[in-house]
Image (cartoon, rainbow, N blue to C red):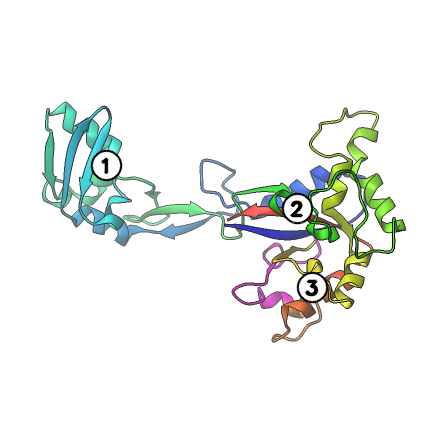
């Protein structure tokens, strides 16, 4: 599923692309092995693995590395069918009726045929280590929401001027310079990943605050990411759905617990009105 997030960032000496990546990094959906382990939590899937261990399956070798599997679909998710196929061919079986609990213990099943789990922090537990702050598995600047943050989602070329604005404002001039930051550094050659076209997906909080007060739809994203260091990490990513939250962030922003998303968005732009904002499309 694709959604749009507005990432609020301070003006500074960090290249905009680097600032965006650093701000979003804590919220990557990840499991152990693909990223550093720090900050990961354990999702205990012991009972789901046991369900697969005790389920009845029928595996059929269809040739050319194809395996047909019959049995509980949810249980099959925890069985490594490639290893099952290797086992069947090692014993020259074309069809294998098996209930793993009848021929081995749970730990042996885990070692020999399990899929997607590893040992947990306590004895005899199995599951997956994951990032509890995870919100995205991929993202890109603008993406399918190209130009939305500036009110010009028509994929036009160049900096452009929003039809909702009175012209090329001072804020847009600032954003234009910010978008070209990497190519203007004497120690860095242009990467091609962040140039003047990026200005369509960048805005200042002050401009977005004015857009909120004018009730312009493009000012309201589905998610807002507060600047690094502005509050505790788990409160930086704010979502509109299924309901505005996390609720603990409201007090930090000076809002009532029952505040509406529109109020939260306005307050964010007000508190960080001297910051800039990047519009990103993220998959989750």
Q: Which secondary structure, mark 2?
A: helix
Q: How far is disc 3 from disc 1 in space, using C-alphas?
A: 48 Å
* Residue at the (50%, 46%) spot, across then down: 29
Q: Which mark is residue 113?
A: 1
- The residue wearing badge 2 is 23
Q: Earlier in the sequence, mark 2 or mark 3?
A: 2
Q: Which mark is residue 222?
A: none
Horizontal and vertical percent for residue 136? Answer: 54, 47
Foreground pick, 4 / 37: 4
* Residue at the (82%, 58%) spot, across then down: 206
Horizontal and vertical percent for residue 279? Answer: 68, 48
Q: How far is disc 2 from disc 3 in space, using C-alphas?
A: 18 Å
Q: Which mark is residue 265?
A: 3
Report if residue 237 lies within the magenta region. yes
Q: Residues within 10 Å of mark 3 (few under 14, many from 20)?
A: many
Q: Which secondary structure, mark 3?
A: helix
- Left or right, 234 with reference to 7: left
Q: How far is disc 2 from disc 1 in space, using C-alphas?
A: 39 Å
* Residue at the (30%, 48%) spot, across then down: 123
Whether pointer 3 and pointer 1 mark residues with C-beta atoms closer than 8 Å, the reply is no
């Amino acid at each position: 599923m694709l959604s749009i997030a507005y990432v609020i960032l301070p003006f500074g000496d960090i290249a905009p692309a680097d600032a965006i990546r650093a701000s979003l990094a804590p919220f990557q959906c990840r499991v152990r092995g693909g990223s550093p382990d720090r900050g990961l939590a354990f999702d205990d899937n012991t009972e789901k693995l046991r369900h697969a261990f005790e389920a009845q399956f029928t595996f059929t070798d269809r040739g050319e590395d194809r395996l047909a599997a019959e049995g509980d679909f949810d249980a099959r998710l925890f069985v490594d069918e490639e290893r099952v196929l290797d086992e069947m061919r090692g014993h020259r079986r074309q069809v294998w009726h098996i209930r793993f609990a009848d021929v081995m213990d749970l730990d042996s099943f885990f070692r020999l045929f399990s899929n997607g789990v590893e040992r947990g922090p306590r004895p005899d537990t199995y599951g997956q280590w994951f990032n509890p702050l995870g919100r995205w598995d991929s993202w890109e600047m603008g993406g399918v929401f190209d130009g939305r943050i500036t009110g010009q989602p028509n994929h036009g070329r160049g900096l452009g001027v929003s039809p909702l604005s009175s012209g090329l404002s001072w804020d847009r001039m600032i954003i234009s310079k910010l978008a070209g930051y990497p190519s203007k550094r004497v120690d860095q050659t242009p990467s091609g990943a962040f140039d003047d076209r990026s200005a369509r997906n960048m805005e200042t909080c002050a401009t977005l605050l004015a857009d909120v007060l004018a009730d312009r739809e493009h000012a309201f994203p589905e998610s807002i990411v507060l600047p690094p260091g502005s509050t505790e990490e788990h409160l930086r990513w704010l979502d509109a759905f299924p309901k505005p939250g996390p609720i603990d962030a409201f007090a930090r922003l000076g809002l009532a617990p029952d505040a509406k998303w529109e109020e939260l968005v306005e307050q964010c732009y007000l508190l960080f009105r001297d910051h800039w904002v990047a519009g990103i499309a993220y998959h989750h």
